[in-house]
Image (cartoon, grey):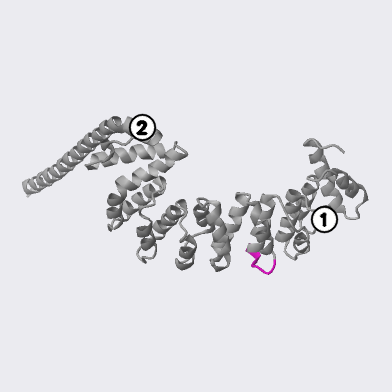
Amino acid sequence: MLSDEIFLLVCIACVLLSVLTVMFLYLLIKKTLEISKEKQINVYKDQVHHTIYDYLYHEHKSRLLVPDSTIKFMAIERLLTEYSTVIEGEGKGRISLLADEIFHERYESILNQNKWSSRMNVLYKIDGFKMGSLSELLKKKLRDPNTSKEEKLIIFRCLANNQDRALAQLFRSVPALFSVLEYRSILNRVEDELFTSLVADYSHFPERLKLAIIDMIGIQKKLDFVTFLENQLGDEPFEIRLRSMKAIGEVGFLSDSEVIDRFAESDSWEERLMAAKVIGKTRALNGLQILEALIKDSSWMVRAEAAKSFLSYNDGLERLYDIRFTSDDRFARDMASEWIERGIADGYSY
Protein backbone atom coordinates (compact mmCIF):
# COMPACT_ATOMS: atom_id res chain seq x y z
CA MET A 1 0.00 0.00 0.00
CA LEU A 2 2.74 2.44 0.99
CA SER A 3 4.75 1.69 -2.14
CA ASP A 4 1.67 2.46 -4.28
CA GLU A 5 1.27 5.82 -2.61
CA ILE A 6 4.93 6.66 -3.12
CA PHE A 7 4.68 5.64 -6.76
CA LEU A 8 1.61 7.88 -7.18
CA LEU A 9 3.43 10.84 -5.60
CA VAL A 10 6.42 10.28 -7.86
CA CYS A 11 4.12 10.24 -10.91
CA ILE A 12 2.42 13.47 -9.83
CA ALA A 13 5.80 15.08 -9.22
CA CYS A 14 6.99 14.03 -12.67
CA VAL A 15 3.87 15.39 -14.30
CA LEU A 16 4.23 18.71 -12.46
CA LEU A 17 7.90 18.89 -13.34
CA SER A 18 7.09 18.20 -16.99
CA VAL A 19 4.43 20.94 -17.02
CA LEU A 20 6.80 23.42 -15.40
CA THR A 21 9.55 22.51 -17.85
CA VAL A 22 7.23 23.01 -20.82
CA MET A 23 6.07 26.37 -19.44
CA PHE A 24 9.67 27.44 -18.83
CA LEU A 25 10.69 26.48 -22.36
CA TYR A 26 7.66 28.29 -23.78
CA LEU A 27 8.46 31.49 -21.90
CA LEU A 28 12.15 31.19 -22.81
CA ILE A 29 11.37 30.79 -26.50
CA LYS A 30 8.83 33.61 -26.37
CA LYS A 31 11.32 35.94 -24.67
CA THR A 32 14.03 34.99 -27.16
CA LEU A 33 11.73 35.78 -30.08
CA GLU A 34 10.74 39.09 -28.50
CA ILE A 35 14.39 40.05 -28.00
CA SER A 36 15.17 39.07 -31.59
CA LYS A 37 12.19 41.12 -32.81
CA GLU A 38 13.27 44.16 -30.79
CA LYS A 39 16.76 43.93 -32.23
CA GLN A 40 15.40 43.83 -35.78
CA ILE A 41 13.17 46.82 -35.07
CA ASN A 42 16.07 48.81 -33.62
CA VAL A 43 18.31 47.90 -36.55
CA TYR A 44 15.73 49.17 -39.03
CA LYS A 45 15.12 52.27 -36.92
CA ASP A 46 18.83 53.07 -37.26
CA GLN A 47 18.63 52.51 -41.01
CA VAL A 48 15.69 54.85 -41.63
CA HIS A 49 16.31 57.43 -38.89
CA HIS A 50 18.10 59.87 -41.19
CA THR A 51 15.66 59.12 -44.01
CA ILE A 52 12.70 60.17 -41.84
CA TYR A 53 14.63 63.22 -40.63
CA ASP A 54 15.28 64.29 -44.23
CA TYR A 55 11.60 63.82 -45.06
CA LEU A 56 10.32 65.80 -42.07
CA TYR A 57 12.77 68.68 -42.34
CA HIS A 58 13.69 68.71 -46.03
CA GLU A 59 10.76 66.86 -47.71
CA HIS A 60 13.09 64.24 -49.23
CA LYS A 61 11.18 61.03 -49.88
CA SER A 62 12.68 57.55 -50.07
CA ARG A 63 11.60 53.99 -50.80
CA LEU A 64 12.77 53.14 -47.27
CA LEU A 65 9.63 54.88 -46.03
CA VAL A 66 7.45 52.24 -47.70
CA PRO A 67 7.57 49.31 -45.23
CA ASP A 68 7.02 45.81 -46.57
CA SER A 69 7.05 43.87 -43.29
CA THR A 70 5.65 44.08 -39.79
CA ILE A 71 9.13 44.81 -38.41
CA LYS A 72 9.55 47.80 -40.71
CA PHE A 73 6.04 49.03 -39.94
CA MET A 74 6.75 48.98 -36.22
CA ALA A 75 10.15 50.64 -36.61
CA ILE A 76 8.76 53.57 -38.62
CA GLU A 77 5.76 53.80 -36.31
CA ARG A 78 8.02 54.16 -33.26
CA LEU A 79 10.22 56.74 -34.96
CA LEU A 80 7.23 58.85 -35.98
CA THR A 81 5.86 58.57 -32.45
CA GLU A 82 9.15 59.86 -31.05
CA TYR A 83 9.25 62.73 -33.54
CA SER A 84 5.62 63.68 -32.95
CA THR A 85 6.35 64.47 -29.30
CA VAL A 86 9.11 66.99 -30.10
CA ILE A 87 8.49 68.38 -33.57
CA GLU A 88 6.25 71.37 -34.30
CA GLY A 89 5.10 73.40 -37.28
CA GLU A 90 5.24 72.01 -40.81
CA GLY A 91 7.07 68.90 -39.67
CA LYS A 92 4.05 67.95 -37.55
CA GLY A 93 1.89 68.13 -40.65
CA ARG A 94 4.30 65.95 -42.60
CA ILE A 95 4.12 63.32 -39.85
CA SER A 96 0.34 63.23 -40.33
CA LEU A 97 0.68 62.93 -44.11
CA LEU A 98 3.25 60.17 -43.86
CA ALA A 99 1.21 58.27 -41.27
CA ASP A 100 -1.88 58.53 -43.48
CA GLU A 101 0.09 57.16 -46.40
CA ILE A 102 1.82 54.31 -44.58
CA PHE A 103 -0.58 53.19 -41.87
CA HIS A 104 -4.04 53.78 -43.34
CA GLU A 105 -4.77 50.25 -44.51
CA ARG A 106 -3.08 48.59 -41.53
CA TYR A 107 -4.98 50.70 -38.99
CA GLU A 108 -8.26 50.30 -40.84
CA SER A 109 -7.89 46.54 -40.66
CA ILE A 110 -7.17 46.61 -36.92
CA LEU A 111 -10.11 48.93 -36.23
CA ASN A 112 -12.40 46.33 -37.75
CA GLN A 113 -11.08 43.56 -35.50
CA ASN A 114 -12.88 42.29 -32.41
CA LYS A 115 -9.95 42.75 -30.02
CA TRP A 116 -10.71 45.86 -27.92
CA SER A 117 -7.13 46.48 -26.76
CA SER A 118 -5.81 46.42 -30.33
CA ARG A 119 -8.45 48.93 -31.46
CA MET A 120 -7.65 51.21 -28.52
CA ASN A 121 -3.91 51.13 -29.28
CA VAL A 122 -4.54 52.09 -32.89
CA LEU A 123 -6.91 54.89 -31.90
CA TYR A 124 -4.24 56.37 -29.63
CA LYS A 125 -1.79 56.27 -32.54
CA ILE A 126 -4.28 57.89 -34.92
CA ASP A 127 -4.78 60.60 -32.31
CA GLY A 128 -1.05 61.07 -31.77
CA PHE A 129 -0.29 61.29 -35.49
CA LYS A 130 -3.39 63.45 -36.16
CA MET A 131 -4.33 61.24 -39.07
CA GLY A 132 -7.22 62.48 -41.17
CA SER A 133 -7.59 59.72 -43.74
CA LEU A 134 -9.59 57.49 -41.39
CA SER A 135 -12.15 60.13 -40.39
CA GLU A 136 -15.09 58.55 -42.19
CA LEU A 137 -14.41 55.17 -40.62
CA LEU A 138 -14.13 56.82 -37.19
CA LYS A 139 -17.51 58.53 -37.65
CA LYS A 140 -19.01 55.19 -38.58
CA LYS A 141 -17.52 53.66 -35.42
CA LEU A 142 -19.06 56.47 -33.35
CA ARG A 143 -22.52 55.45 -34.51
CA ASP A 144 -21.85 51.77 -33.82
CA PRO A 145 -23.59 50.73 -30.56
CA ASN A 146 -20.84 48.15 -30.00
CA THR A 147 -18.16 50.83 -29.82
CA SER A 148 -17.14 51.38 -26.20
CA LYS A 149 -17.24 54.73 -24.40
CA GLU A 150 -13.43 54.77 -24.20
CA GLU A 151 -13.15 54.31 -27.96
CA LYS A 152 -15.71 57.03 -28.63
CA LEU A 153 -13.82 59.49 -26.46
CA ILE A 154 -10.59 58.99 -28.41
CA ILE A 155 -12.49 59.12 -31.70
CA PHE A 156 -13.94 62.51 -30.75
CA ARG A 157 -10.43 63.68 -29.88
CA CYS A 158 -9.18 62.50 -33.28
CA LEU A 159 -11.95 64.36 -35.09
CA ALA A 160 -11.29 67.48 -32.99
CA ASN A 161 -7.61 67.26 -33.92
CA ASN A 162 -8.60 67.35 -37.56
CA GLN A 163 -11.04 70.27 -37.04
CA ASP A 164 -13.82 68.13 -38.50
CA ARG A 165 -16.86 70.24 -39.35
CA ALA A 166 -19.17 67.35 -38.47
CA LEU A 167 -18.20 67.59 -34.79
CA ALA A 168 -21.27 69.62 -33.76
CA GLN A 169 -23.66 67.21 -35.48
CA LEU A 170 -21.91 64.24 -33.90
CA PHE A 171 -22.13 65.82 -30.44
CA ARG A 172 -25.89 66.05 -30.94
CA SER A 173 -26.42 62.57 -32.37
CA VAL A 174 -24.11 60.51 -30.13
CA PRO A 175 -25.50 59.96 -26.61
CA ALA A 176 -23.93 62.14 -23.90
CA LEU A 177 -21.49 59.64 -22.43
CA PHE A 178 -18.73 61.89 -21.19
CA SER A 179 -17.97 63.91 -18.09
CA VAL A 180 -17.30 67.66 -18.24
CA LEU A 181 -13.58 66.96 -17.96
CA GLU A 182 -13.68 64.50 -20.86
CA TYR A 183 -15.60 66.97 -23.02
CA ARG A 184 -12.97 69.57 -22.17
CA SER A 185 -10.23 67.21 -23.36
CA ILE A 186 -11.99 67.14 -26.73
CA LEU A 187 -12.62 70.89 -26.95
CA ASN A 188 -9.02 71.65 -25.99
CA ARG A 189 -7.99 70.40 -29.46
CA VAL A 190 -10.48 72.58 -31.32
CA GLU A 191 -9.26 75.75 -33.05
CA ASP A 192 -11.05 79.10 -33.00
CA GLU A 193 -13.13 78.72 -36.17
CA LEU A 194 -14.59 75.37 -35.20
CA PHE A 195 -15.05 76.46 -31.58
CA THR A 196 -17.13 79.41 -32.78
CA SER A 197 -19.38 77.07 -34.75
CA LEU A 198 -19.80 74.87 -31.67
CA VAL A 199 -20.84 77.87 -29.59
CA ALA A 200 -23.42 78.67 -32.28
CA ASP A 201 -24.93 75.19 -31.71
CA TYR A 202 -24.60 75.47 -27.92
CA SER A 203 -28.33 75.31 -27.19
CA HIS A 204 -28.62 71.86 -28.84
CA PHE A 205 -25.96 70.22 -26.69
CA PRO A 206 -26.28 68.20 -23.45
CA GLU A 207 -25.60 70.12 -20.23
CA ARG A 208 -22.17 68.59 -19.55
CA LEU A 209 -20.97 69.68 -22.98
CA LYS A 210 -22.40 73.15 -22.36
CA LEU A 211 -20.45 73.35 -19.10
CA ALA A 212 -17.28 72.24 -20.90
CA ILE A 213 -17.72 74.95 -23.56
CA ILE A 214 -18.15 77.57 -20.83
CA ASP A 215 -15.09 76.26 -18.98
CA MET A 216 -12.93 76.38 -22.11
CA ILE A 217 -13.88 80.01 -22.76
CA GLY A 218 -12.51 80.83 -19.33
CA ILE A 219 -9.47 78.55 -19.48
CA GLN A 220 -8.43 79.87 -22.91
CA LYS A 221 -9.47 83.45 -22.01
CA LYS A 222 -11.59 83.85 -25.14
CA LEU A 223 -12.50 87.52 -24.85
CA ASP A 224 -14.83 87.40 -27.89
CA PHE A 225 -17.27 85.21 -25.97
CA VAL A 226 -17.78 87.39 -22.89
CA THR A 227 -21.20 88.53 -24.13
CA PHE A 228 -22.14 84.88 -24.67
CA LEU A 229 -21.16 84.14 -21.06
CA GLU A 230 -23.18 87.10 -19.80
CA ASN A 231 -26.21 85.76 -21.67
CA GLN A 232 -25.97 82.57 -19.62
CA LEU A 233 -26.48 84.46 -16.35
CA GLY A 234 -30.25 84.82 -16.72
CA ASP A 235 -32.68 81.95 -16.38
CA GLU A 236 -30.20 79.16 -17.04
CA PRO A 237 -29.66 76.28 -14.55
CA PHE A 238 -27.67 77.07 -11.41
CA GLU A 239 -24.49 75.26 -12.53
CA ILE A 240 -24.53 77.02 -15.91
CA ARG A 241 -24.81 80.43 -14.22
CA LEU A 242 -22.06 79.66 -11.72
CA ARG A 243 -19.63 78.33 -14.34
CA SER A 244 -20.35 81.29 -16.60
CA MET A 245 -19.50 83.74 -13.83
CA LYS A 246 -16.32 81.80 -13.07
CA ALA A 247 -15.34 81.91 -16.77
CA ILE A 248 -15.95 85.68 -16.87
CA GLY A 249 -13.58 86.03 -13.93
CA GLU A 250 -10.94 83.93 -15.70
CA VAL A 251 -11.26 86.02 -18.86
CA GLY A 252 -10.95 89.11 -16.66
CA PHE A 253 -13.44 91.30 -18.49
CA LEU A 254 -17.08 92.19 -18.05
CA SER A 255 -18.94 94.19 -20.70
CA ASP A 256 -22.04 94.74 -18.55
CA SER A 257 -21.16 95.28 -14.90
CA GLU A 258 -24.83 95.37 -13.92
CA VAL A 259 -25.10 91.59 -14.31
CA ILE A 260 -23.11 91.25 -11.09
CA ASP A 261 -25.88 92.93 -9.12
CA ARG A 262 -28.16 89.92 -9.51
CA PHE A 263 -25.46 87.57 -8.27
CA ALA A 264 -24.53 89.81 -5.36
CA GLU A 265 -28.16 89.82 -4.19
CA SER A 266 -28.74 86.09 -4.79
CA ASP A 267 -30.14 83.81 -2.08
CA SER A 268 -27.32 81.38 -2.91
CA TRP A 269 -24.06 82.04 -1.07
CA GLU A 270 -22.19 80.34 -3.94
CA GLU A 271 -23.44 82.97 -6.36
CA ARG A 272 -22.62 85.81 -3.95
CA LEU A 273 -19.14 84.32 -3.53
CA MET A 274 -18.68 84.17 -7.29
CA ALA A 275 -19.84 87.78 -7.59
CA ALA A 276 -17.12 88.85 -5.15
CA LYS A 277 -14.49 86.87 -7.08
CA VAL A 278 -15.50 88.28 -10.46
CA ILE A 279 -15.45 91.85 -9.13
CA GLY A 280 -11.88 91.32 -7.97
CA LYS A 281 -10.77 89.91 -11.31
CA THR A 282 -12.61 92.33 -13.61
CA ARG A 283 -12.57 95.51 -11.46
CA ALA A 284 -16.18 96.14 -12.40
CA LEU A 285 -17.24 99.80 -12.46
CA ASN A 286 -19.76 99.41 -9.66
CA GLY A 287 -17.66 96.81 -7.88
CA LEU A 288 -16.60 98.73 -4.77
CA GLN A 289 -20.18 99.54 -3.81
CA ILE A 290 -21.15 95.88 -4.16
CA LEU A 291 -18.12 94.74 -2.17
CA GLU A 292 -19.09 97.05 0.68
CA ALA A 293 -22.34 95.10 0.95
CA LEU A 294 -20.73 91.68 0.48
CA ILE A 295 -18.16 92.20 3.21
CA LYS A 296 -21.12 92.21 5.60
CA ASP A 297 -22.47 88.94 4.20
CA SER A 298 -23.68 86.18 6.51
CA SER A 299 -21.21 83.74 4.90
CA TRP A 300 -17.61 83.93 6.11
CA MET A 301 -16.34 82.82 2.68
CA VAL A 302 -18.22 85.61 0.92
CA ARG A 303 -16.92 88.20 3.39
CA ALA A 304 -13.35 86.98 2.95
CA GLU A 305 -13.56 87.02 -0.85
CA ALA A 306 -15.10 90.49 -0.82
CA ALA A 307 -12.29 91.81 1.41
CA LYS A 308 -9.70 90.21 -0.87
CA SER A 309 -11.31 91.76 -3.96
CA PHE A 310 -11.04 95.26 -2.47
CA LEU A 311 -7.28 94.97 -2.92
CA SER A 312 -7.59 94.72 -6.72
CA TYR A 313 -8.69 98.39 -6.82
CA ASN A 314 -6.25 101.29 -6.53
CA ASP A 315 -8.14 102.73 -3.57
CA GLY A 316 -9.25 99.36 -2.22
CA LEU A 317 -6.96 99.40 0.80
CA GLU A 318 -8.25 102.84 1.74
CA ARG A 319 -11.82 101.53 1.54
CA LEU A 320 -10.89 98.66 3.85
CA TYR A 321 -9.54 101.15 6.37
CA ASP A 322 -12.85 103.03 6.22
CA ILE A 323 -14.76 99.81 6.90
CA ARG A 324 -12.39 98.88 9.71
CA PHE A 325 -12.99 102.13 11.57
CA THR A 326 -16.53 103.12 10.61
CA SER A 327 -18.60 100.01 9.80
CA ASP A 328 -21.43 99.08 12.14
CA ASP A 329 -20.85 95.38 11.36
CA ARG A 330 -18.34 93.74 13.70
CA PHE A 331 -17.65 90.85 11.30
CA ALA A 332 -16.99 93.28 8.47
CA ARG A 333 -14.56 95.25 10.66
CA ASP A 334 -12.70 92.05 11.60
CA MET A 335 -12.47 90.90 8.00
CA ALA A 336 -11.27 94.32 6.86
CA SER A 337 -8.55 94.30 9.52
CA GLU A 338 -7.36 90.86 8.46
CA TRP A 339 -7.07 91.81 4.78
CA ILE A 340 -5.47 95.16 5.53
CA GLU A 341 -2.64 93.24 7.18
CA ARG A 342 -2.42 90.85 4.24
CA GLY A 343 -2.47 93.74 1.78
CA ILE A 344 0.35 95.54 3.53
CA ALA A 345 2.35 92.30 3.72
CA ASP A 346 1.91 91.88 -0.05
CA GLY A 347 3.27 95.35 -0.76
CA TYR A 348 0.21 97.59 -0.81
CA SER A 349 0.49 100.97 0.88
CA TYR A 350 -2.17 103.13 2.45
Of residue 215 and residue 90, the one placed in the foreground of this image is 90
Asked if the magenta segment contains residue 235, the reply would be: yes
Q: Position of residue 87 (x, y in %)?
A: 44, 36
- For image coordinates 44% across by 52% down, the residue present is 162
Q: Is residue 156 left or right of residue 193?
A: left
Residue 337 vertical placement versus 45 (above, below): below
Q: Position of residue 284 (x, y in %)?
A: 78, 53
Q: Which residues are magenta?
A: 234-239
Q: Position of residue 242 (x, y in %)?
A: 66, 60
Secondary element under disc 2, as helix, strand or loop, is helix
Q: Position of residue 349 (x, y in %)?
A: 85, 37
Residue 95 vertical placement versus 166 (above, below): above
According to the picture, the residue beneath numbered tag 2 turns out to be 54
Q: Amino acid at mark 2?
A: Asp
Of residue 157 and residue 55, the one placed in the foreground of this image is 55
First in sequence: mark 2 vs mark 1: 2
- Label 2 close to label 1 by CB (< 8 Å): no
According to the picture, the residue beneath numbered tag 1 turns out to be 286
Q: Which secondary structure is most common in the magenta stretch?
A: loop
**Mark 1 closeness class: few <14, some 14–19, many ≥20 residues within 10 Å:** few
Residue 145 vertical placement versus 95 (above, below): below
Q: CA distance from mark 2 to mark 1?
A: 60 Å
- For image coordinates 54% across by 58% down, the residue present is 180
Mark 2 or mark 1: which is in front? Answer: 2
Q: How many numbered tags mark residues here?
A: 2
